[in-house]
Image (cartoon, rainbow, N blue to C red):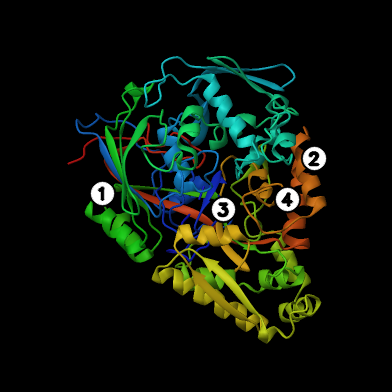
Amino acid sequence: MKSKKFLALLLVLVMAISVLASCKPADEPTDADKPAETTTDEGKEEGKDDADLATANGSVDQMPTDGEPDADQYMNTFDSAQPNTLDPAKGDDMYGNSILLNILEPLVRIKDVEGQMGSIEYFPAGAESWDVSEDGLTYTFHVREGNMWNDGTPVTAKDYEYGILRGVDPRTACPFANILYYIKGAQEVNTTKLADGEEPDFSKVAVKATDDKTLEITLEEPTPYFIDLVVTRVFFPQKKDWVEKFGDTYSTSPETAPQCGPFILNDWVINSEQNYVKNENYWDKDNVKLSKYKVSIIKDSNTIYNALKAGQIDYAGVGDPKWKGQFLDNPDYYNTVRANPDTTYFMFNCNEGANTVNAKIRKAISISLDRQGLIDACYNGVPTAAFDFVPPAVTCQGLEFNKLGEGWISKLMEDNPDPKALFAEGAEEAGLGDPSGITIKLMGSDTSQEGRTSGEFVQQCLEEALGCKVEVDNQDWSQFINIVQTGEGWDIAWLAWGADFNDPSNFLETMHSKTAAYPTGYKNEEFDKLLDEAKTEQDPEKRCQLLHDAEKIALYDDAAVTPVIHRIAQVFRRSYVRNANYSYFSTMGMSRIFTSGRK
């Protein structure tokens, strides 16, 4: 939440947490083999699919998977920030999610189909198999024997049950509890206010470990894409005894983070590096070839490109044309191109006291942003302007949902030819006075020169179009999140959301009034109702229409958010890298990557 790289580093403002995260700073460079990989942008021509892009950019049409593994198996990668926590129930960014996929074991993972780049299949992980009842309501997961926690105790069905119930528990304040609402009783328990000292009634939640190896989950309604939800972090196993032992420090460091995945986070130097070693107690260790890998924290794009060129990291997304030319015709690298299901966007503060509480003000800002100008001036002309929140790469149960270059923001522009007048009208309604006396506070999390440059572009764009003042405040990631979470001191937060699963609801439900991830103050009962109806609608076309109607309310009627850019990833990998993830939705992490022919 994805997650690519917006401009050569935009400025971002991100707080999106998904996919679960799904999210991260809108402009940051990111590791291409993370599940919500947000690497760099590459221009995508309208009407071209991933295969066309591959041909047009000289990229491979098949990911290299063969070759004799090197004797010394290691990788060097990067990310641009550290997560605040490794707690699956409390984390809300992709930094943490990419770590959790490597140190924990979901019930199910999603992997690429060998020889079919872009195709995916479900891979039995923590569960060796699962059954679905004839009515589509009950899922029975058979938890496998032989997987162990790093304290030597076995991973059981009770650990998965506890992880889910902890996300449902309103005292946890899980930012993605809404993903669990598909489970019978989960929404009722999560939204019930508790008196001091009162315990939630978990007996109402249809999740039960019938024994150490069997987990039963019953849904409110049949949900065709439920397995896609199971791969997300709110379904990950957790250790009750460690939660009770460590309390608020649970999963804040390698020492307090229970681990049972293909790798162990052995060493963590905050804002410097993470070092992982192969987990010799992992059930599938024989298929994990890497013995170790390092993730360096690198924020600056030029530093990333230099590290890739010097062999200090083994792969990275490259969007800057000046750098791309150094890799394209170099036999030491191969590259892949694909459309990513993510959107960078402005999230508006709708709480009382914010300057953006009035919908006309938000609409005026939405239509005043020169998206193509931003792309050309700050992003080397490579991303694609976004006019819908749900990106074209996301489908609705196999049906096309949005088209590139079209969307509700385009219609909003057509119906409001004078954004300055609209802004002034909204300012008067909100009692803010003359627009020249209004200062819109734009929050970002990219403190680099590129971040400052893109922020200045938006500042100038909005000031000229609306006659107001714009104040840009870029903070480091952790501080940015803390400020945004208060719901005060900002009017716009610039975010990026990458899909955690392939469905429009993954984007739209971030604005549902019961979603705790964003304290924006936005609430529309009709919007909530449409999303709730879409959860239970069994006809794909009718469900698609419900979600389209909801998107119209959020973008056109209320302007609760406004999309900025859809991103395309062009990732360059060293020629010896094998079996890297291609699909955005892959959750295999580093478990299948290896090297062959490293010199």
> Is residue 45 in view?
no
Mark 1 or 4: in front is 4
Q: Are marks 1 and 4 in contact (CB under 8 Å)?
A: no
Q: Secondary structure at mark 4?
A: loop
In the rendered image, which residue does mark 4 sit on? 513
Above or below for 198 versus 303: above
Q: Are marks 2 and 3 in contact (CB under 8 Å)?
A: no
In the image, farthest residue toward the front = 197
Q: How many marks?
A: 4
Residue at x 43% of width, y 53% of height = 39
Mark 2 or 3: in front is 3
* The C terminus sits in image quarter: top left
Amino acid beneath label 4: Ser
Q: Does residue 225 appear to the left or right of 97 in the view shown?
A: right
In the rendered image, which residue does mark 2 sit on? 533
Q: Are marks 3 and 4 in contact (CB under 8 Å)?
A: no
Amino acid beneath label 3: Ala
Residue 584 horizontal/vertical position (percent): 50, 42
Q: Which of the marked residues, 2 or 1, is nearer the chain's N terminus?
A: 1
Mark 1 or 3: in front is 3
In the rendered image, which residue does mark 1 sit on? 331
Q: Which of the marked residues, 1 or 4, is nearer the chain's N terminus?
A: 1
Mark sitting on residue 292: none
Amino acid beneath label 1: Pro
